[in-house]
């Protein structure tokens, strides 16, 4: 097992990464001093991991309340959030009762938001079970839900007390979700870690084969990158925005196609290709590196072309992005592999050319 720290002063917390951590009571018990917790999960993850987690905690007399939500991005909304509050109130959960998120990014984001708001804030523990959640969403405290008009538009910054990433849980993940997580792993190489990008070029097949050593390395390296960025800019007033490479386009793909149609990681992959294309049109990343980036996403079994929503729909949905300032769209783009920047200076003509080149046409 390896342990990293997200350095946020009094709110600093550990990220434990290793195989078999779901059985490690010693990592959880220090965060459960009142011997009670609510475990929020979904109908897919519950049959796989809920009973064993509850049984392990029961050995130490920790009483657990299961709250099982429907599975899917399309349920990451206010109505499903209400089910968490229903469960917490029905079982009279108190300010000292931590919420444990057991699942992927959807469960982590919703549980975190419930923890931030229930009784104005209760402790929160992340047990991410998808690659995407282990390398990205469980770390850094962004929590929230979708709105029909825009992705992740309602939420709060609210940090967990501990993150427990058990890489053994990735063995039950579908290939599509594994690839979706790899999209966010590639992101770290692109925005700030060229040697990691090169490592990914050397080791992509091992990751796809779920080689435990390669997965452990990729998760630790991703979390190191994320922890550094979050420690420097928790509330996204600067550097943290770089973590959104591909997301302005990607969120438009997810919202425009209907939540759940494109996986988040798939949309980020196609969105990153668009951001790369736009960067090249601005004279930044060179043609050879554009091709190199496309190749790596394709090797990860990710689609590189966006869905045929039409240019105007993309533009309209991108105008709802959280990075919009003073009505002006801002983009995370690449100067080169390993160096990203945020810019608002993108001529609309170039943006239209990128969309035209990177989306499928009916
Ligand atoms: P997800 O939570 O929908 O999980 C993907 C699928 O895998 C689901 O069907 C889930 O039930 C299933 N699953 C989870 N663990 C499993 C396991 N071990 N074995 C088998 N199946 C398993 O999707 P995701 O890709 O984990 O997360 C995407 C979400 O994360 C999006 O809503 C996105 O907005 C959010 N996100 C948040 C942040 C953040 O910083 N908070 C960062 C990136 C993404
Ligand atoms: N996933 C983007 C962030 O955490 O800032």
Image (spheres, rainbow, N blue to C red):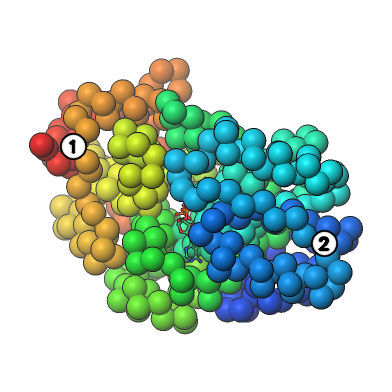
Evaluate if marks 2 and 1 touch, with contact meaning CB atoms under 8 Å apart.
no
Q: Residues within 10 Å of mark 2 (few under 14, many from 20)?
A: some
Question: Which label number is shown at residue 63?
Answer: 2
Which of pointers 2 and 1 indicates the residue nearer the eye?
2
- Residue 236 position (above or below residue 51): above
Instruction: Report the front residue among 294 and 47.
Output: 47
Give the percent coordinates (x, y) of residue 358.
17, 42
- Give the quadrant of residue 7: bottom right
x%, y% of residue 140?
60, 50
Question: Is residue 166 found left or right of 38 in the rendered image?
Answer: left
Residue at 50 percent of width and 68 percent of height = 219
Q: Quadrant of the N terminus?
A: bottom right
Residue at point 56%, 65% (across, down): 47
Residue at image coords 45%, 17%: 326
Q: Which residue is mark 1?
A: 308
Position of 40 relative to 168 (above/below): above
**Residue labelled 2 has its Cβ within 8 Å of some atom of ligand 1:** no
Is residue 100 in sight in this rendering? no
Residue sitting at 61 percent across and 38 percent down? 81
């Amino acid at each position: 097992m390896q342990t990293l720290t997200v350095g946020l002063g009094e709110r600093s917390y550990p990220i434990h990464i290793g195989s078999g951590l779901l059985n490690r009571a010693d990592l959880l018990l220090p965060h459960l001093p009142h011997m009670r917790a609510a475990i929020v999960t979904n109908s897919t993850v519950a049959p796989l991991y809920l009973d064993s987690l509850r049984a392990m905690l029961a050995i130490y007399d920790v009483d657990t309340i299961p709250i099982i939500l429907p599975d899917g991005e399309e349920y990451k909304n206010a109505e499903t959030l209400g089910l968490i509050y229903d469960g917490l109130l029905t079982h009279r959960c108190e300010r000292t009762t931590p919420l444990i998120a057991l699942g992927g990014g959807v469960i982590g984001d919703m549980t975190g938001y419930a923890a931030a708001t229930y009784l104005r804030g209760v402790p929160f523990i992340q047990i991410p079970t998808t690659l995407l959640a282990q390398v990205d969403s469980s770390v850094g405290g962004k929590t929230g839900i979708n709105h029909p008009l825009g992705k992740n538009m309602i939420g709060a910054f609210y940090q967990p007390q501990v993150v427990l990433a058990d890489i053994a849980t990735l063995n039950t993940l579908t290939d599509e979700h594994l690839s979706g997580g790899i999209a966010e792993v590639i992101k770290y190489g692109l925005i700030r870690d060229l040697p990691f990008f090169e490592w990914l070029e050397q080791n992509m097949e091992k990751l796809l084969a779920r080689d435990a050593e390669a997965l452990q390395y990729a998760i630790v390296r991703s979390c190191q990158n994320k922890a550094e960025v979050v420690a420097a800019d928790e509330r996204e007033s600067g550097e943290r925005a770089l973590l959104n490479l591909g997301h302005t386009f990607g969120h438009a793909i997810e919202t425009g196609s209907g939540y759940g149609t494109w996986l988040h990681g798939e949309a980020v992959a196609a969105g990153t290709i668009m951001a790369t294309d736009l960067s090249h049109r601005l004279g930044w990343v060179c043609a050879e590196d554009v091709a190199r980036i496309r190749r790596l996403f394709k090797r990860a079994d990710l689609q590189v072309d966006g869905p045929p929503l039409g240019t105007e729909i993309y533009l309209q949905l991108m105008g709802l992005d959280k990075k919009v300032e003073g009505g002006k769209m801002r983009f995370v783009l690449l100067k080169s592999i390993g160096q990203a920047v945020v810019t608002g200076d993108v001529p609309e003509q170039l943006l239209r050319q990128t969309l035209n080149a990177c989306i499928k046409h009916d």
